[in-house]
Image (cartoon, rainbow, N blue to C red):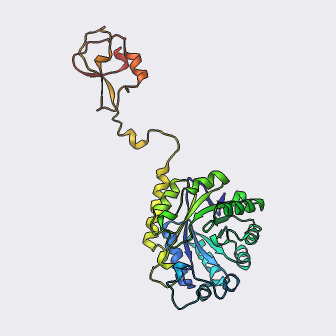
Amino acid sequence: MKIKNKKIDCGSVFVIAEAGVNHNNKLSLAYKMIDEAAKAGADAIKFQTFIANKIQLPNSTKPNYQKKIRGKKYKNIIEELEPSFDDQIKMMKYCKKKNIIFLSTPYDNESVDFLDKMGISAFKISSSDTTNHSFLEYVANKKKPIILSTGMSNSEYVDVAVKLLKRKGIGNNLILLQATSDYPTPNDDVNIRVIPSFSKKYKIPVGLSDHTSDDVASLGAVALGASVVEKHFTLNRKLPGPDQTSSLEPKELSQWISKIRIMEKSLGSDKKFITKSEKNNLTMRKIIVLKPMKKNTKITSKMLLTMRGTKNGILPLKSNISKILGKKIKCNIITAKQFSWDMI
């Protein structure tokens, strides 16, 4: 499958820089975040699209990680971060100019319609909507690729959501992300071993929405076959907002992506072969004729030794040794000499 012009497979990781609401509804900050994400080498930058009154009850309880924001009700925080539709159109145009894919997570039907009309190339669905089946169906009806996070879900919830989306015809355009909805996520709660399990079970691209404070989980996910990874970032962790403190700063974002690209290359092939760099350093043991002997002497194992030191020569494989033993030497051997087939 593809998201815009990017092919999604485990040979080339699709990296999403998660801006979320960290631009604090300021278009100038959003532009700077797009600049930094493109500069760092991200394939896409993802924001959020929602209408606060349609997703949040007035007396909603704050998640634990947002309780540090004192004096404001959770709904008030959400209302202040409600994004401008007009700004998002400008942000998408700016992303096109910077050659980075604009993505956004919608949280209500009106936002889905807006993003679809705007020409979004894929929908990213929040973990909070994995069990929101009517919403999943509404998004699926747009017939665009869906990236589904699975935080706060067990295997049964994920299974039902995937089957629902496949019935809606999204099976070949669905990406499943392992996620843990805690910010930052403790490393022992990441559970990246579920990635190959998801991949084997559902036969679709799988990845990680990484909320940890380091890059270990992302690198491990790529090693386990993740096709997509995403991570929150900000221009400055000291900026106001609920997600700032658990986000990477620009330099860290660049380092994170650089390590992912190195890991991507390190995975190589599933076939074992001698690499180009190894060919310049081949110092495996070779067969040496050790014992001085006269021409026509029959060769025994006591006359042979294996030693390192040259690139050329005959490897001491059992198949090679068996072809040498019992044969007669064609020349006089005065001192130890590297063996070659023309000697017998």
Figure quadrant of residue 21: bottom right
The percent coordinates of residue 8 (x first, y second) are: 61, 57
Q: Quadrant of the N terminus?
A: bottom right
The percent coordinates of residue 161 (x first, y second) are: 71, 63
41 with respect to 304 (left or right) = right
Q: Quadrant of the C terminus?
A: top left
In the image, residue 335 sits, relative to residue 159, either above or below, namely above
The percent coordinates of residue 182 (x first, y second) are: 54, 72
Q: Which residue lies furthest to the left in this view?
A: 334
Figure quadrant of residue 135: bottom right
249 with respect to 102 (left or right) = left
State whether residue 126 appears in this view. Answer: no
Q: Which residue lies furthest to the top in this view?
A: 296
Q: In percent of the image, x 54 and y 56: which residue is there?
A: 193
State whether residue 37 appears in this view. Answer: yes
In the image, residue 278 sits, relative to residue 193, either above or below, namely above
Q: Residue furthest bottom?
A: 71
242 with respect to 306 (left or right) = right
In the image, residue 72 sits, relative to residue 174, either above or below, namely below
In the image, residue 331 sits, relative to residue 88, either above or below, namely above
72 with respect to 336 (left or right) = right
Q: Nearer the viewer, residue 186 or 9?
A: 186
Q: In percent of the image, x 43 and y 21: which residue is there?
A: 319
Q: Number of labelled discs?
A: 0
The percent coordinates of residue 254 (x first, y second) are: 45, 67
Q: In percent of the image, x 36 and y 17: which residue is there?
A: 342
